[in-house]
Amino acid sequence: PQAVWDRVRGLTRYAEERFERIPGIEIRSSRQTDMRTGLFLFAAEGLDATELAPWLWQEGKVVCRSVKEAGAVRLSLHVYNNEADVERTAELVERALKEGIMSTGAGGRPEEG
């Protein structure tokens, strides 16, 4: 329904606005309003997406995937997510950029995609 679509697009817009305030983040999803979906891709300067995605799971149970071809992490936002989920993820990414991350090794949950 339209209400679901509106909610997903609004949440993606919220993620764009929040992540664009983080120094070192490059948003790699389409910024065109008519192209916006629940898929939100970002790259973090100096961090390998294939290491960041499992680190986000390990540190905050953030369900995401690395997209190796894009060198980015993908969040798949939908109605079961909320602004607090986006905020928690953004805070973890800020921490990773500031402090670095330890490789999670083979035990990380998300697989590269």
Image: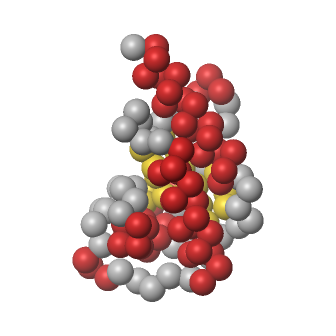
* The image quarter in which residue 22 lies: bottom right
**In the image, residue 78 above or below residue 102:** above
Q: Quadrant of the C terminus?
A: bottom left
26 or 102: nearer the viewer: 102
Q: Residue at x 46, y 14 (%)?
A: 2
Q: Quadrant of residue 111?
A: bottom left
Give me the residue at 36% from left, 63% from top: 61
**Position in image of residue 7 (x %, y %):** 50, 27
Q: Is residue 69 visible to the viewer in this orientation of the structure? A: no
Find the residue positioned furthest to the top: 1
Specify whether 33 is left or right of 103.
right
x and y percent of residue 107 in the render? 25, 77
- Residue 43 visible in the displayed image: yes
Q: In this view of the protein, which residue sits in the foreground, 49 or 7?
A: 7
State how the image is colored: secondary structure
- Tell me if residue 52 comes above or below residue 40 in the rendering: below
Residue 39 image offset from top left, x and y in percent: 48, 41
Residue at coordinates 51% horizontally, 50% vertically from top-left? 84
Quarter occupied by the N terminus: top left
| Residue 65 point in image, percent of width and height | 39, 57
Who's the residue at 50% across and 82% down the image?
101
Residue 11 sits above or below residue 54 on the image? above
